[in-house]
Amino acid sequence: MSQRLTQIQAQKTEQQLRLSQQQLQLVRLLEMPIAEFEQQVKKELMDNPALEEGAPEERDNVRDSADEMENNDTGIDPYGDMENERVSDLSAYSDDDLPVYAPSSGTSERNELPLGDSGSFIEYLESQMMNYDLSEEEEKILKYLIGSLDNRGFIDRPIATLTDELAFKEYIYVSEQEVEKVLHILQSFDPAGIGARSTQECLLLQIDRQLRNEEEVLSPLKEKILRLEREIIAHHYDLFINKNKERLKNKLGISGVQVDALFEDIKKLNVNPGFALSESSTDRVQTQIPDFIVETDPEGNIEMRLNSGEVPRLHVSGDYINQLKAFQAHPSTLTRSEKEGLVYTRQKIEAAQMFIESVKQRRRTLYETMKAIIELQRTFFLTKDEDDKVRLVLEDVAKKSGYDVSTISRVCSSKCALLDGRIYPLSDFFKLTRKNAVGEEIDGRRVSEMLQEIVDSEDKMNPYSDDRIVELMKQQGVTLARRTVAKYRTELGIPAVNSRRG
């Protein structure tokens, strides 16, 4: 029987969900805990010159109406279908308002956390206190300052804030001058640079330590080099940060080779004294840096804020906006290289805008998610008693916050909160329940703890079977099926009875 091959053309309609580039970027940012997020922001700042940190400068020379932006873009086609492509959101913002991310814009979202180092680090610093003749009050202030160091070994809050905290939390009533005096003592501790309030001060502390070193007599040349380095950091720090070596050469009256040598020497200084110490400690304890800070008081008030970490203010570069507008001013006379420059400039500005919006959305999502968790578990947050924890799953938080369950899952997967001095993974605020053999809801976490206690107390020569565990749990008021016990046992990583027999 002969066979014949035929081609059939059919039309098919199907619906697919595709995430935009910005949505994909937001998904990745939501999954990152604060430490990883800080590194991502630094990477974006390095990779995209149109993304800048710090407060944006006045953009009077950049302000144009949406109509003017439309008129300037008359259809340049350097590569195919570019005539309809513009910087998507540039004209949608008000006169002086390109996207800006400010990490501490709200009073309820302050970054004022003493976090980030190992116990051995703190003990090492406190052991140096015996070298000083301190009063009891000064000792308490110094210990509080040590506990307030961030993960780089810096004091990241103003003296006025620390003074208020000492009064409110420690009942120590001192002036800002007294706190400043004790801070200077901390700054004399090892490693050099500890207790600095900025990178600039950290570098100055290390240079001054070398200049005042009584154990080593400096040669005239070395002293001159250190004093030049101090002059650069103390009085020309902006030029140093921007690597403006030409202006530094003129300011200091030295050659370009000497400026290069000074830069190399300064780069050898440690801008993370806290990291250096904790990394070298053999008994370092790995610490979690919380993404949320939650504090309660006896009156039943709960305050929550986000930990902004070392994330700076972000904005789109005014220079790049000016450059784009210069290209758009005379589109018909652009050379090919200028058209390439136009495409490059647009891409970088759009990437910067997109990243800033993603960062802002990440912050809003984290804040609203944690706010919903607190509202749903309010009693537990106030008492910290497991018995006060209500049943809570991702779907409950999703409904309360207005976000999708997958979004809530990403927020909660790898983050933790500091609740009244104790760190909790976000998963600890959820209470999962399962049905028992008679249809009642039971706390899954409590059942797991009960099962673990039963197995820990069994005779290793004659361990309990799953059926026997069912009987023992029933005696404690929990009725489960044998297969449910087996499921819990597997989740806890407890082997079957034969494998446990010693």
Image (cartoon, grey):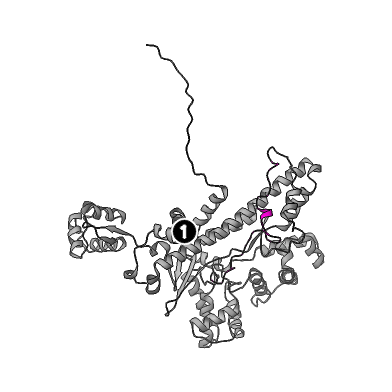
Helix, strand or loop at mark 1: loop
Picture quarter with the C terminus: bottom left
From the image, give the main secondary structure of the stretch colored magenta: loop
Q: Which residues are magenta?
A: 82-108
**Percent position (x, y) of residue 396?**
39, 60
**Percent position (x, y) of residue 420?**
44, 74
- Packing grade of label 1 (10 A; few <14, some 14-19, many >=20) is some
Q: Is residue 331 above or below residue 258?
A: above
Magenta-colored stretch includes residue 84: yes
- Seen at 29% across and 57% down, the residue is 434
Picture quarter with the N terminus: top left
Q: Is residue 164 left or right of residue 221?
A: left
Report the residue marked by disc 1.
Answer: 402
- Seen at 65% across and 78% down, the residue is 214
**Percent position (x, y) of residue 227?**
73, 72
User: In the image shown, does 18 or 293 lie closer to the viewer?
Assistant: 18
